[in-house]
Amino acid sequence: MRRYLFSFFLLALASAAAAQPVSKKGEYYLPREGDWALGVNASPVLEYIGNFFSESFNPAPGASYPNNNFAVAGKKFIADDLAYRGGVRLGILADSYRSFTPEFSQEPTNTTVEDTYRRTFTNAFASFGMEKRLGNTRIQGYYGAEGVLGLGTEKHVFDYGNSITPQNTNPDRFEWDIQFQNDPREATSVTETGAFITEFQKGNTFHIGARAFFGVEIFLFPKWSVGFEYGFGPMFTATGNSTIISEQWGTPPGGTSEQFVTIVTDEGGSNVFRLDNDLNGGALFMFFYF
């Protein structure tokens, strides 16, 4: 498959290098002042085309994001060779789950109570910069710089139908698997000490950075291109402390008797600074100009 894709690109590159920037119908291949552009990941489409040269199954092409931040990428040309560029993402997830457990009663009963698990994620990302174009043929280079901002939040909340009381010190409650956004560890709503988590507030994550970039675009059709991009720059990521609130029947610190106890546990955050090369999204991109 990679061999066929590589051959396809060599043919496209040779064709673009030899062709003029205006089609036989008088259509401009290259972007011009006033044009807008929208970018997507080119890999699904190119893989689909490449499969025509093999006996492999040809899945339908898709349009995914051109970067790992799941941001919509766009450009606005203020001159034939100069453009503003940016990316934006606003992702909000709010879902809830419920389960039923037998209701605690000192008298026989067949009723149940509801336990619920709610989680909310927020992911915001924005980038903005300028791009300078090089060349007058259908193979164009470009370079520029942009700034990057990102914010992520995460919260998990548990509500239980059976309360912890002196008559019911270890109530029947559903044990939920906590579905984190990026945390790879496995955890449930019941801690190792038997406490029931009521709230798990992950520390907010903030990203700020800048990158210088350069890349190449090949205009295969009028106002339709594929290309790749590399970049270099600093990125600072700060993750705040996480807070876990849980409850159980036990003896509090310094206490002498068992009672209802609320436990607040803090988990440390982190700060990360990185200065390195990057590959924009790890894949080829495709831009449409209009």
Image (cartoon, grey):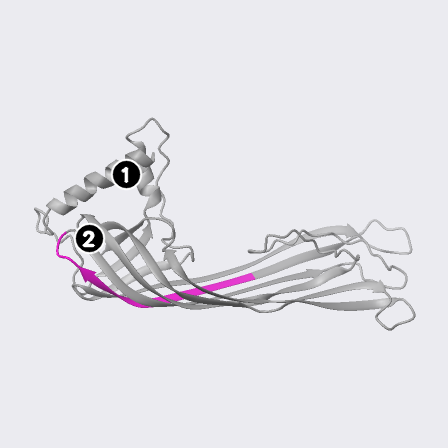
Residue 125 lies in the magenta-colored region: yes
Give the label on residue 223, or none: 2
Return the x and y of residue 246 as percentages of the image width and height.
74, 64
User: Which sits in the foreground, 172 or 79?
Assistant: 79
Return the x and y of residue 256 as percentages of the image width and height.
92, 71
Badge 1 is on which residue?
Answer: 6
Residue farthest to the bottom, as pictured = 254
User: Which sits in the foreground, 173 or 127?
Assistant: 127
Give the label on residue 15, or none: none
Residue 70 lies in the magenta-colored region: no
Side (left or right) of 61 relative to 167: left
Q: Quadrant of the N terminus?
A: top left
Three-letter residue code for mark 1: Phe
Residue drawn at x 33%, y 38% as measured from the top left: 47
Residue drawn at x 55%, y 61% as measured from the top left: 121
Q: Which residues are magenta?
A: 121-137
Residue drawn at x 30%, y 66% as measured from the top left: 145
Three-letter residue code for mark 2: Lys
